[in-house]
Amino acid sequence: MGEYVWFFAIVVGPLLFAAAVIYGLTRRRLRAGERGRQHRKVEELYGERHE
């Protein structure tokens, strides 16, 4: 029984963690339309301030 616990801790745990990280990174990217709306809203709120 103890071997299974170590197997999950050493092999399955990091795989689940990697899958969660990859899922989180892919879900936070904006699509082209969302990016345009975000840019317009930022311009509306802050104006054109380029430093």
Image (cartoon, grey):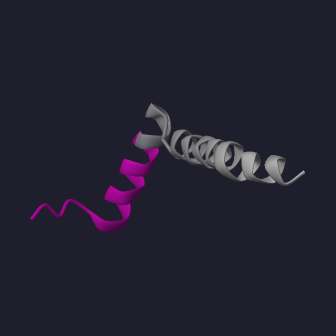
48 in the magenta segment:
yes
The front one of 22 and 46 is 22
Q: Residue at x 38, y 49 (%)?
A: 40
Q: Mainly helix, strand or loop, the magenta region?
A: helix
The front one of 51 and 13 is 13
Q: Residue at x 51, y 45 (%)?
A: 25
- Horizontal side of 7 relative to 10 (left or right) equals right
- Horizontal side of 12 relative to 42 (left or right) equals right
Q: Is residue 5 above or below residue 34?
A: below
Picture coordinates of residue 48, whole percent (x, y): 20, 59
| Count of marks overlaid on the render | 0
Picture coordinates of residue 23, whole percent (x, y): 60, 41
Outermost residue, right direction?
A: 1
Please state the extent of the stretch shown in magenta in the rendering: 36-51
Picture coordinates of residue 51, whole percent (x, y): 9, 65
The front one of 5 and 37 is 5
Picture coordinates of residue 2, whole percent (x, y): 84, 54
Outermost residue, top direction?
A: 32
